[in-house]
């Protein structure tokens, strides 16, 4: 456990916590003393993708942390409606909500099928909206709270014509086919800003956080072929930035749509290992 215990006594929900950024945030929060409800569709190891709730839970518990596994399909409104209820029933309250789970298919936008558009918005916009609505009464009861939405740099609109064929951002937007994913994340960023300002008279912080570029998660590292221009940042940076946005007062940090590394530089915050014991 971390020596600072910044989240001692707090209860947090982290969705998409079976792997990648979500698992890293859950581990970092648990290391700071939070009791964490970890949510994902993959409960047991051995599936098509690496990572599972059980593996995240085992890591947290081995390090001395407390967690609750909630297997849920975030794309299903009925299934996701029980997440906050189960968390509060188990831990007694809710202080922090991290909406990290996401769905993406990188296909040409003209080939996107209605079911894919619906799924992107169910996971990337509707689920964060509904979970935030369900979490809000519990945060109001406590008199404070933190909502963090994990976004993406693909939410930034690409430049307009004329296009520079040597511009990496132009080429990325053209070749990545991230329009559907980026559109849903852009909507999430606007939703975040709206929630924050509408709650500005309350001690509830609402922020959006995205990595500067690709994150060195299990999935990204398995793809390979990265170079220094790809801004492959350590997953610890996202976990640290998430921690900063989920313990500081709302009158200091709310309504931000920010990138991880610039935020950490702004706050002069060091990046720690996921156990919180060492500077990364």
Image (cartoon, rainbow, N blue to C red):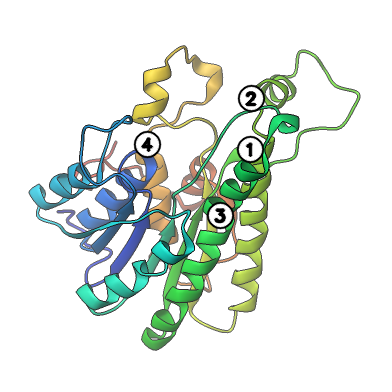
Judge from the rendering whether residue 206 lies leftward or rightward of residue 20; answer left or right.
Answer: right
- Residue 253 visible (yes or no): no
Residue occupying the point 42% across, 18% down: 223
Q: First in sequence: mark 2 or mark 1?
A: 1
Earlier in the chain: of badge 4 and badge 1, it is 1
What's the mark number on residue 122? 3
Viewer-nearest of labels 3 and 2? 3
Closer to viewer: mark 3 or mark 1: 3
- Mark 2 and mark 1 in contact? Answer it, CB < 8 Å: yes
Q: Which residue is mark 1?
A: 154
Which x, y percent locates residue 276? 23, 48
Check disc 4 and report its element: helix, strand or loop: helix
Give the alpha-carbon distance from disc 3 to disc 2, as whole Å: 22 Å
Residue to which mark 2 is pinned: 176
**Quick one: label 3 or label 1, which is nearer the N terminus?**
3
- Vertical placement of 211 versus 203: above or below? above
Residue in front for this viewpoint, 225 or 108: 108
Q: Which residue is mark 4?
A: 235
Circle nearer the viewer, 2 or 1: 2
Q: Residue at x 41, y 85 (%)?
A: 143
Alpha carbons under labels 4 and 2: distance apart: 21 Å
Q: Secondary structure at mark 3?
A: helix
């Amino acid at each position: 456990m971390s020596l600072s215990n910044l989240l001692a006594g707090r209860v947090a929900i982290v969705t998409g916590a079976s792997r990648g950024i979500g698992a890293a945030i859950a581990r970092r929060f648990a290391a700071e003393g939070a009791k964490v409800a970890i949510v994902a569709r993959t409960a047991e190891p051995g599936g098509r993708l690496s990572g599972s709730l059980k593996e995240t839970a085992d890591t947290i518990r081995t390090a001395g942390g407390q967690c609750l596994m909630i297997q849920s399909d975030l794309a299903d409104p009925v299934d996701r409606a029980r997440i906050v209820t189960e968390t509060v029933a188990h831990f007694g309250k809710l202080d922090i909500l991290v909406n990290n789970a996401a769905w993406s298919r990188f296909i040409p936008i003209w080939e996107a099928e209605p079911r894919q558009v619906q799924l992107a918005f169910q996971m990337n916009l509707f689920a964060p909206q509904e979970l935030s609505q369900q979490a809000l009464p519990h945060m109001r009861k406590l008199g404070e709270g933190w909502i963090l939405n994990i976004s993406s740099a693909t939410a930034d609109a690409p430049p307009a014509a004329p296009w520079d064929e040597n511009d990496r951002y132009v080429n990325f937007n053209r070749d990545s086919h991230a329009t559907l994913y980026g559109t849903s994340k852009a909507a999430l960023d606007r939703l975040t800003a709206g929630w924050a300002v509408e709650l500005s008279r309350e001690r509830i912080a609402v922020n959006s956080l995205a990595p500067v570029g690709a994150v060195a998660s299990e999935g990204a590292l398995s793809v390979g072929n990265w170079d220094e221009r790809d801004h492959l940042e350590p997953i610890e940076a996202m976990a640290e930035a998430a921690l900063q946005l989920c313990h500081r007062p709302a009158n200091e940090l709310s309504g931000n749509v920010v990138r991880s590394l610039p935020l950490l530089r702004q706050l002069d915050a060091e990046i720690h290992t996921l156990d919180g014991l060492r500077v990364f």
